[in-house]
Amino acid sequence: MSRSGDDRGQPADDGSGALRRIAPPARRFLARRRGVLGRLAVWSLVEAGQAFLVGYSVAHSLDRGFLAGDTREGLLWLAVALGAVLLGTPVSRGVFAQLAGLTEPLRDGLVRRAVDRSMAQALDSPGGADQSAVSRLTNQVEIARDSFAGLVLTLRSFLFTAAGALLGLLSLHPALLVVILPPLLGGLALFLATLRPMAAAQRRALAADEALGDHAARARAALRDLTACGTGPQVARRGADLVAGAAAASRALAGWAAVRTMALGIAGHLPVLALLVAVPWLRGRGVTTGALLGAFTYLVQSLLPALHTLMTALGAAGARLLVVLDRIVGPAPAAITACAGPEPARPALTAVGSPTAGDHGRRGADITSPVPATADRLPSPGVPDPPPPARRSRSCADGRPTAAVELRSVTLSYGVRARPVLDSLDLSVAPGEHLAVVGPSGIGKSTLTRLIAGTLAPSSGEVRVAGREVAGRAAHELTRLRTLVPQEAYVFSGTVGDNLAYLRPDAGRTDLDATVRDLGLRSLVARLGGLDGSLRPDELSPGERQLLALARAHLSPAPLLLLDEATCHLDPASEARAEEALARRPGTLLVVAHRLSSAVRADRVLVLDGVEAVCGRHEEVLARSPLYRDLTGHWNDGPHQGA
């Protein structure tokens, strides 16, 4: 199972690398908002003056007022202190009004960056899914916004409040700074020393959380394949390892949080204790009672609360902000393969669906094609070239034509001791040929289509499409080779035209109209409001969804179409028209037949009976395969008769 966001195997990052990556865009962001920063600085200067006045007024209310016997002056100084406290309300309002000018543009920019990265990854790996994109767009962007807002508030408040308080202490008596500053700076230094390792621990915790979520999402999507392949225990063990890793990362983060708490205790409580212990020494050097009370006021009212808030914000919000910004703005994490044991390939279907994994076919004889060999030119990536003419042959170096589909001694077993679903199957399908696959339910028909599509790897043998081995091939390469239409058709909310052109974005109006005409969809498209009409998947019947998926496949530039009971919800007439239109399309068509008529329309029929595979024209297989004769009788007598 592939996943992104796991830091295992990558060099440990102590936070300095992230800081270097974040610093340039951060400077550019702040440089474009100098006006907001200037207004914030003005309000912060007012806040510094407020902090200075509170302690200064308390000290002078004692020294010049109450202790000097002048109650009136003492009350006047207390009134000044009260006014300074009340000044905090308009200051806070002004600060928050300017803060929005920083936080909202940051959030918008991060959302755009996260979307751009996810879209770029989707274009680079069309069959993949960025499972951590949702976390970046929701949780991580909001973490960054809230952390940035808290950091700006606390850092600004500490700098200006501390400046006002220290200036006030100096104005009262310089000896006060000698007592207060050493424990204050010691605690702050210890706290700053924890920032880098705590950022690294925060980064590992976030990476572990993303990796665990990604693993859970992929495992949940592949539950049926995991059960069928017997790889559930390995994936469960991998999940347990990820849970243990996340727990270890959380414990490491908690350890550094404990050190931060100790630093907070040193910086937050020792200055007050030192001031109390040093009172006799301070009194001997001429520090007045009012100055001592003013110093306590500065500590308790301004300096220590600001320091406590700063250390809490830097230790939590600062570390989170650094890590989250690096994950959104920094380079995308490399995908790391971390699979314990064999695991089925993740589907990368060009027409999304979930084919049945539990089919049980058995053995196949050598099956070669009597139909003249023809070939299709592969479209280029991105916007594909127009499909080439049908019935054209591309040859190997020795002159033999390249088969559109070729299976060489393919065996597939869901488990070491399990009976093979397909056993030593050889098959060659010529370019431009129309092949129908029939057999009882669960015999291996859907398994065969998945092997050819490259979404399931054989236990042994080789599967080739247009001469290229499909096992281990990248999703975007498989998309160029084939289009798989499963039984459960995928239709998304959007316009009818967008749904039809999903596999061929450059399709013009003429191409869309031709597809609608060929598949007999005019009445359906008209009912939906035309090609520009909006559709909702839940308002369509299963048959209507299948028709739209078949039209999408008709427009696809891939030279091979695989229909896995993709017409089971259609009436016989609609099925016949759709299959005939797809057979006329340049390229090769392989259909898992739902009715006898599908088999009769095909150039050849492949019968899987669990013992021996039989392939040939309808009349030939009818003579050679008892199972096919039984199925023909069932189809003729049953409700699915459509010949």
Image (spheres, rainbow, N blue to C red):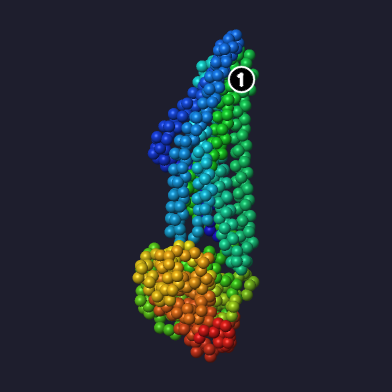
Q: Eyeballing the image, is 52 above or below 96?
A: above
Q: Position of residue 97 (x, y in %)?
A: 47, 36
Residue 641: x, y in percent?
54, 84
Q: Quadrant of residue 215?
A: bottom right
Q: Residue at x 38, y 73 (%)?
A: 514
Considering every residue shown, the one lying at the far bottom of the view is: 623
Q: Position of residue 232 (x, y in %)?
A: 63, 63
Give the camera-side residue of 242 and 79.
79
Amino acid under disc 1:
Leu
Residue bearing mark 1: 275
- Is residue 253 positioned above or below 392 on the image? above
Q: Is residue 33 left or right of residue 199?
A: left
10 Å neighbourhood of mark 1: few (<14), some, or many (≥20)?
A: many
The residue nearer to you, when weighing 240 against 446, is 446
Q: Is 261 in front, or is 245? A: 261
Residue 288 visible (yes or no): no
| Disc 1 element | helix
Whether residue 102 is visible to the viewer of this picture, yes or no, is yes
Q: Which residue is located at x 52 percent, y 28 percent? A: 88
Residue drawn where x is 41% and y is 71% of the image? 555
Count of numbered marks: 1
Residue at left 44%, top 43%? Answer: 105
